[in-house]
Image (cartoon, helix red, strand yellow):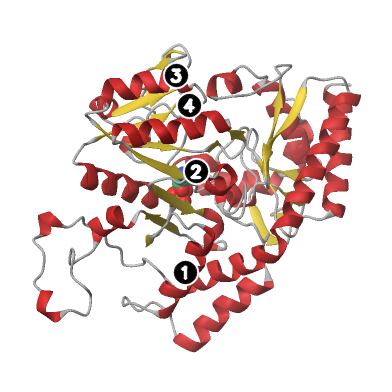
Amino acid sequence: DYPLPDYFERTSKSLEWMKKAKEVMPGGVTANIKSFDPYPIVMEKGNGAHLTDVNGNEYIDYLLAYGALMLGHGHEKITEAITKQLHQNGTCLFGTPHELEYTFGKKIQQHYPSMELLRYTNSGTEATLLALRLAYAYTGKYKIAKFEGHYHGGYNEVLVSVSPPLNEAGEELNPNSVIESKGVPEKEAENTIILPFNELEACEAILRRHQHDLAAVMIEPVQGGFIPATEKFIKGLREITKELGILLIFDEVKTGFRVAIGGAQQLYNVKPDITALGKVIGGGFPIGIVGGREEIMLESSPRRGADVFDSSQSKKSKSKDVLFHSGTYNGHPMILAAGLATVEVLEEKIEDVFKNTAFLKQQLEQLFKRYKIGMKAIGIGSIFSVVLTNKENIRNYRDLQQTDLSLRKEIDLHLLNEGIYTKPLNRYSLSTAHGIKEIDATIKAYERVLSKVCG
Ligand code: PLP
């Protein structure tokens, strides 16, 4: 009774691969997010805006590795940059300081001036994790607040109320801390306070109640990359956290270089205390960056207060005076080279990506109107999502849960058959490789699907 019998025919080899993959990995996948019903499509190669699966079917890729590939697949500048690094410097992992750590860091600071000092990590998850440790170290407090529906990575402190069932989630203005994963101790929920996104008064009340315990508020300033904070909300949150001595952490892993070149902090003109970046800045390779106010970041300096070159102060600090941060691969030169090439291309091309995204959204909206269905394309910059609702405004997780997710999923599966790729229910990200040709093909595919599903 599966609604799409031809899915099985078109993707027969993916099914074969997924059966084999189960011999190697639980569920056949190496990240739960890669799995969907009836089975995920196994890809073979990517080129520009396009993907080819193991059956040879072509897709226009709007998943773009969950937004990471802002120059599309295999951009020549990235290939050039990493090849040069590899050929000049061997395997290119030194385990020592090197030049690109400075050069790339300066480039990041140029666009994110709030990151007065920064550290490299290997993923967005590691970046938000380090951001929290910095906040604990700096404030001497050990609880955090995060927002219902916001994702910051897969570790215990933040795996709380990311997608809670609404019957467990408590009141709208006073949401519960709901553990997301088997294997996370229930007591973790006590240290993570949950806030309602875009509800300033309710947030203020909760923050005041917990101010003496809270080290930081961590937020996706544009939830999921497509539900923006209102200006009043984000500015208000900045003021309240400052007043209460709670650090404000912007998790810009998704929004960095995607909603504006300088991220949501540029868009809103709000200065967080700490920022986490990831995804786009790795040019397709694993990376994270944490940066923020100098006095906070200095918590992780190996010799607190001493100049690097001042041998009179070379006495090592006691380990308990210094925040631990390390990693064999931190600041990997090939990845920083890929990141630098990415940012340099975006400095030239980002406005084109924004224009093309706006055009695609507008064309979709016209189509939805023509078909008289309550459907919207919402988002900012180079990311958007399609929501099925007649509601004027989608403001947070609860609004999103009330949209028609099952029809959206059905549409997405039909779109896969039509060669439009995003994981069912995921958002759409565009790249410099998505041009008018791809947008036209997408609109035509959407029209065929809507006439079948909603016509
Ligand atoms: N923070 C946000 C806002 C994210 O979207 C993600 C990943 O989707 C992460 C953190 C975790 O990043 P990573 O998957 O690189 O560990």
> Between tags 4 and 2, which lies in front?
2
- What mark, if any, has residue 106 been given in the picture? 1
Please tell me which residue is depicted at 59% across the width and 45% down the height of the picture.
267
Q: Nearer the viewer, residue 68 or 104?
A: 104
> Between tags 1 and 4, which lies in front?
1
Where is mark 2, residue-wise? 270
Q: Disc 1 residue type?
A: Lys
Where is mark 4, residue-wise? 163
User: Which one is earlier in the sequence, the residue at label 1 or at label 4?
Assistant: 1
Q: Mark 2 vs ligand 1: CB under 8 Å?
A: no
Residue 186 image position (x, y, % from top left): 26, 25
Please tell me which residue is depicted at 87% across the width and 31% down the height of the picture.
366
Q: Disc 3 residue type?
A: Glu
Q: Nearer the viewer, residue 156 or 453?
A: 156
Is there a contact, CB below 8 Å, between mark 2 and mark 1?
no
Q: Nearer the viewer, residue 56 or 265?
A: 265
- What mark, if any, has residue 201 been given in the picture? 3
Residue 319 image position (x, y, % from top left): 11, 59
Task: Give the structural element (helix, strand or loop) at label 4.
Answer: loop
Is there a contact, CB below 8 Å, between mark 4 and mark 3?
no
User: Which one is earlier in the sequence, the residue at label 2 or at label 3?
Assistant: 3
User: Which one is earlier in the sequence, the residue at label 4 or at label 2?
Assistant: 4
Q: Disc 2 residue type?
A: Val
User: Which one is earlier in the sequence, the residue at label 2 or at label 1?
Assistant: 1
Task: Give the structural element (helix, strand or loop) at label 1.
Answer: helix
Task: Give the structural element (helix, strand or loop) at label 3.
Answer: helix
Is there a contact, CB below 8 Å, between mark 4 and mark 2?
no
Whole-angstrom CA distance, mark 1 to mark 4, is 37 Å
> Between tags 4 and 3, which lies in front?
3
